[in-house]
Amino acid sequence: MTELSYRPFPYGWFQVSYSHELEVGEARPVHYFDEEMVLFRGDDGLPKLVEAYCPHMGAHLGHGVHSTLEDGTCARGKVSGNRIVCPFHGWEFNGDGYCESVPYATKMPPTAVGQQLLKTWPLCERNGTIWMWYHPAGQPPKWEVESFAELDPQNELWSEFETYRWTIKTHCQEMAENGADPAHFFFVHGVADAPLSTQDFDRGPRREGVIEAPLDTPRGRVEGRIAYITQGPGLAVTRFTGLCETIELGNVTPIDKNTVELNYAFSQQMEDGKKTGGGIAAAIIRDIVKQTNEDIVIWEHKIYRDKPLLCDGDGPIAKFRKWYSQFYYEG
């Protein structure tokens, strides 16, 4: 894959963790948008995201001391109340980036009083996921994260998340463009027939689309339907119908200019405590994951054509690119 530095990070809401991955009193280092950060959850239950390095002497706030994790790596950062604690000298910072305690000092350094010392990012916890708002100029959120009832962890009619995570050498626009390219389903994924696709690009940061394609199954050919909603460049919800009601939360977050993290969380409809599709339910997820692995081979070895040579059988790729361009900050 060639350098993609001419396409900057898009702005929007991006996943930094699933809710169940961050307990109260827990902190962990994360790296997104070419920055070291620390994600933590205080006693108030609210997640916070701050830059990683202590302004005192530069220690990483996400790596602890005195103990190791099961895999032998250094312990994660320490949380005290609603503060992240520096492992080097014990300075304590709240989730807004202000220092609230220097335990061995009789008074705060004058340059620290009333000053935000750590960069922070807005967070939202919704759909069983912790989202960060990223904007290269630090502008506040321009829309809210949409809620989906099926993805509510308290919704007992839908199964608990089954999650998958990849680190991929590509730009997130390349991945999103798949939704505007139905022709590739036949050649890359081997669907029975080239799918039919309809898409709506006129809803601001929200985009909707439907892909219909027949599926060959042990039960014979079934008319499959894929309906998706994307909200900005980081959030995509896809509903698969035809065999077993399945919803997929597919989120992509840039790690650096040429690397992204892709997260899938699947939930399926329940009946009497069981997934309604039986063995078919697991087969659906396996097939989606298989198709993603097939896509990754393409994404990691292709280049970006700014002016692709399109034909009448291609999907609305030009319309997609115009829609996606709204998430690049011009300055």
Image (cartoon, rainbow, N blue to C red):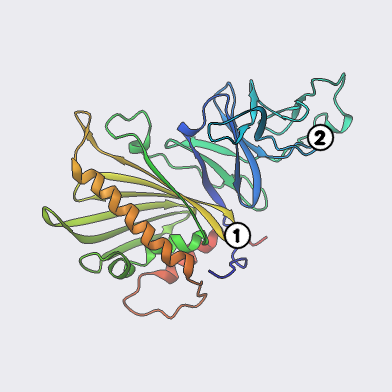
- Report crowding for label 2: few under 14, some 14 to 19, many 20 or more residues within 10 A (C-alpha): few
Of 211 and 16, nearer the camera is 16
Q: Is mark 1 on a helix, strand or loop?
A: loop
Q: Is mark 2 on a helix, strand or loop?
A: loop
Residue at 27%, 68% in the rendered image: 186
Query: What is the three-letter code of the residue carrying label 2?
Result: His
Q: Is residue 275 left or right of residue 221?
A: right
Q: Is residue 163 left or right of residue 241?
A: right
x and y percentages locating residue 155 in the rendered image: 32, 30
Is tag 2's residue or tag 1's residue first in the polypeptide sequence? Answer: 2
The residue that mark 1 highlights is 257
Residue at 22%, 61% in the rendered image: 213
x and y percentages locating residue 324 in the rendered image: 49, 62
In the image, is residue 303 above or below residue 217?
below
Residue at 61%, 61% in the rendered image: 8
- Report crowding for label 1: few under 14, some 14 to 19, many 20 or more residues within 10 A (C-alpha): many
The residue that mark 2 highlights is 56
